[in-house]
Image: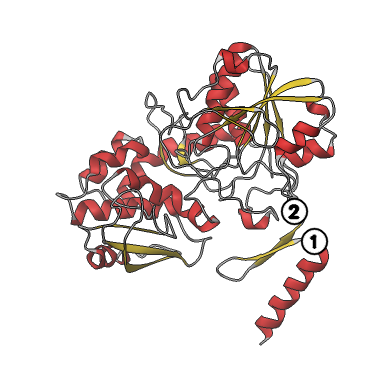
């Protein structure tokens, strides 16, 4: 009764104060005013940072202000700002396409040309940049190395540096917090569109902080400005920000899925479904060949913190194993403070190799993992402490390296 009363009081306080109330899995309550993103700051400052500039905007459906107004509309109507071109990343301008090739289009309300950076090219060309003096990046990332929006940002920064164009990042929160850093660091020389820079799987940085790292380490001559967040603290998860959740991609539908993605997403290049084509992608995984109960028993022996595994059957309506019944594992986060997405994902990989060495296609696991030493350790049956010992030195080096680029408390 007392607990229910206190929860009601918190909700009333939130409603009356305009703040944000959220409960984590241990019912701890945190309150603070809504976060202002880069586009909110730009609007508050009457767009003076872009005054008299010819703008190309790199964005998608996540590019909204705190009231839900599109950055396209805001920049198109801002005085002294000329929005001349728009660029979309993977999944298109409205974030609904799960296709390998996305063509150019036209923004329906303004008629402005939309150049696809997930079609014939993934980097703005000279023709696309003609007449522009500034590129503006405003897309919600989810804090994982292989989520491609940071690669789109890096590619666009390269183009801007090459053509002498100013680059402005409208910063947004890291939704899975800016404190936790984890996972194997990419082997240098293996950079790709799913691995733009030498980062661990979970980098714990905002796109603005990453842009500053990219400038310092890859393109020091770029004219970069980051319009910082206000009110965001590094320990904040997205539900502490007061900002509306907009699915950043078709299969990233909740904060829970974003938290699971660094570990579970690593599995999807192998012969496993990670729930694409179901209602809860990344909250489950499986395959027609999997013995789920055997795998769960092995995972439960590891006593992983903050997570519960249960057997499930599912039939994807799209993507891998479309129309086939899969034996699978449902993953529920019971305590997100204790939950370690990277460890969970690696423990699953270790268990798969132990139990199904002739069936699970481990070679494909390295496509997103990007670390040959860790792959060989898993292949050789090394337990998680041994795997951690392999990648921890490079991870600690990254922790120190990133410190100079962090700008939020």
Q: Please tell me whether residue 226 is drawn above or below residue 282 in the rendered image.
A: above
Which sits earlier in the primary sequence, circle 1 or circle 2?
1
Report the side of 130 relative to 203 (left or right): right
Residue drawn at 52 percent across, 61 percent down: 336
Depth order, front residue of 3/377 = 3
Percent position (x, y) of residue 192? 41, 28
Give the quarter of the figure containing the N terminus.
bottom right
Q: Does residue 33 sit above or below 203 in this rendering?
A: below
Q: CA distance from mark 1 to mark 2?
A: 8 Å
Location of residue 277 in the rendering, given as x and y in whole percent from the top left corner:
39, 54
The one nearer the camera, 317 or 190, is 317
Q: Is residue 322 left or right of residue 407?
A: left
Q: Which residue is mark 2?
A: 34
Which residue sits at x=34%, y=57%?
316
In this rendering, the count of numbered labels is 2
Q: Residue at x 48, y 42 (%)?
A: 97
**Residue positioned most to the bottom:** 1
- Residue sitting at x 29%, y 36%: 373
- x then y, percent, for residue 58: 62, 30
SS of the residue at dot 2?
Answer: loop
Q: Please state the horizontal and vertical placement of residue 379, each as a whole percent of the image.
A: 22, 44
Q: Is residue 185 left or right of residue 80?
A: left
Q: Which mark is residue 255?
A: none
Which residue is label 1 attached to?
18
Mark 1 closeness class: few <14, some 14–19, many ≥20 residues within 10 Å:
few
Q: Are marks 1 and 2 in contact (CB under 8 Å)?
A: yes
Figure quadrant of residue 12:
bottom right
Q: Nearer the viewer, residue 102 or 207?
A: 102
Please state, as top left, top right, bottom left or bottom right, where the C terminus lies in the image.
Answer: top right
């Amino acid at each position: 009764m007392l607990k229910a009363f206190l929860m009601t009081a918190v909700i009333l306080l939130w409603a009356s104060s305009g703040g944000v109330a959220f409960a984590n899995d241990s019912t701890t309550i945190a309150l603070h005013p809504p976060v202002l993103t880069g586009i909110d700051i730009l609007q508050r400052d009457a767009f003076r940072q872009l005054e008299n500039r010819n703008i190309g905007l790199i964005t998608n459906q996540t590019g909204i202000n705190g009231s839900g107004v599109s950055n396209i509309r805001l920049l198109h109507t801002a005085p002294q700002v000329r929005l001349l071109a728009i660029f979309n990343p993977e999944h298109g301008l409205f974030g609904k396409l799960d296709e390998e090739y996305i063509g150019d289009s036209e923004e329906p309300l303004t008629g402005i040309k939309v150049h696809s950076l997930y079609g014939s090219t993934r980097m703005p060309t000279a023709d696309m940049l003609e007449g522009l003096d500034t590129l503006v990046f405003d897309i919600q990332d989810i804090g994982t190395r292989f989520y491609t929006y940071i690669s789109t940002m890096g590619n666009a920064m390269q183009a801007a540096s090459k053509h002498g164009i100013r680059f402005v990042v409208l910063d947004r929160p890291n939704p899975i917090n800016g404190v936790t850093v984890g996972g194997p660091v990419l082997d240098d020389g293996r950079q790709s569109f799913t691995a733009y820079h030498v980062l661990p799987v979970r980098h714990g940085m905002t796109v603005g902080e990453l842009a500053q790292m990219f400038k310092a380490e890859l393109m020091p001559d770029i004219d970069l400005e980051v319009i910082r967040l206000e009110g965001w603290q590094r320990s904040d998860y997205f539900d502490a920000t007061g900002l509306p959740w907009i699915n950043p991609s078709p299969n990233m539908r909740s904060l829970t899925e974003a938290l699971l993605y660094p570990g579970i997403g690593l599995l999807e290049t192998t012969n496993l479904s990670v729930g694409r084509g179901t209602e809860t992608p990344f909250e489950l995984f499986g395959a027609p060949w999997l013995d789920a109960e055997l795998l769960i028993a092995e995972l439960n022996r590891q006593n992983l913190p903050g997570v519960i595994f249960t057997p499930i059957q599912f039939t994807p309506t799209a993507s891998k194993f479309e129309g086939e019944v899969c034996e699978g594992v449902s993953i529920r986060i019971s305590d997100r403070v204790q939950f370690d997405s990277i460890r969970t994902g690696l423990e699953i990989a270790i268990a798969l190799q132990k139990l199904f060495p002739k069936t699970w296609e481990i070679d494909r696991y390295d496509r997103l993992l990007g670390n040959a030493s860790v792959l060989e350790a898993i292949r050789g049956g090394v337990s998680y402490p041994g795997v951690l010992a392999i990648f921890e030195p490079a991870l600690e080096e990254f922790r120190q390296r990133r410190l100079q680029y962090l700008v939020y408390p």
